[in-house]
Image (tube, rainbow, N blue to C red):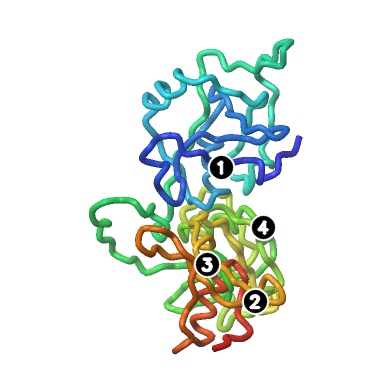
Amino acid sequence: MNIQVEDIRIRAILATYRKRVPVTEGYVEVKDEGTWKQICDKHWTLKNSRVVCGMFGFPSERKYNTNVYKMFASRRKQNYWAYSMDCTGNEAHISSCKLGNHLNVDAEKNTTCENGMPAVVSCVPGRAFAPSSHSGFRKAFRQEQPLVRLKGGANTGEGRVEVLKNGEWGTVCDDNWNLVSASVVCRELGFGSAKEAITGARLGQGMGPIHLNEIDCTGFEKSVTDCKFNMESQGCNHEEDAAVRCNVPAMGFQNQLRLSGGRNPHEGRVEVLAERNGTLKWGTVCSENWSTVEAMVVCRQLGLGSPSHAFQ
């Protein structure tokens, strides 16, 4: 049985989470024949949560207050999905997990979850995506020297994978490069699991040494530098540089910006949604100082890749 990603969501239930962007905690719901259904938590595991969090752009999962949810669930009638999921925790996507038909579906097609409640996930966002409605200050953190970086991608969370070794940045050979290893890189950088493990230097060739070859990760490493790999990179050149596209949280940025009046959806006058006298209004941007650099930010915000022209 195959579930499509459009058919799963994290629905914020508690008031504190409903106001936050991105949504990091709530019921896991699956769309089944046009209706959103909850999943019975009886067979739900933290490994399942890890996969769901990864799909929505979060590196890891955490425990949450079950009592609040028990109270909430007892007051409403749920509409349960008839299946349970069994993930290893390494799947890049929930549709790769095993599915079981575990609930009693009685004659009236009424699915029950006896003594259970809807499965909840609580995800830990990467540093760059901490929810916006926190009051107070963010904890000061020491920026450790990163061992891994992404270069040459047009969007957040994508690029050629580069690793720091002996003070020198180098690339990764794409032999054996797969979603499991790519996901280790993505999570290490504060994103979710990998949407795509890209081979053949499709996001550009790097320079300098090729540090890692034939990478073999279990998926639970803290860093891609902890995975098994082959030091010898004979027969590898920069035409085989590995890259990734990671799942990143939906921050809602693209909803505050639009292009209008262009010949196609990828061009147009830049319009911004901003608050004026308490109401949200669309308005334009003055073209003074407008250059490719500013256009690049707009394109990135709309998920459109790199700009070809910035018109004043």
In the picture of the structure, the residue carrying the numbered disc 3 is 257
Marks 2, 1: nearer the viewer? 2
Residue in the picture at 49% in, 67% down: 282
Q: Residues within 10 Å of mark 1 (few under 14, many from 20)?
A: many
Could you tell me how far apart the alpha carbons at marks 2 and 1 are, in whole angstroms? 34 Å
In the rendering, at what x and y percent does residue 104 appear? 67, 14
In the picture of the structure, the residue carrying the numbered disc 4 is 178
Residue in the picture at 51% in, 14% down: 115
Mark 4 and mark 3 lie on one chain; the one further toward the N terminus is: 4
In the rendering, at what x and y percent does residue 285 appear? 47, 78
Could you tell me how far apart the alpha carbons at marks 4 and 1 are, in whole angstroms? 19 Å
Marks 1, 3: nearer the viewer? 3
In the picture of the structure, the residue carrying the numbered disc 1 is 52
Mark 1 and mark 3 lie on one chain; the one further toward the N terminus is: 1
Residue 129 vs residue 296: left or right? left
Q: Amino acid at mark 3?
A: Leu
Residue in the picture at 58% in, 29% down: 38
Residue in the picture at 48% in, 86% down: 287
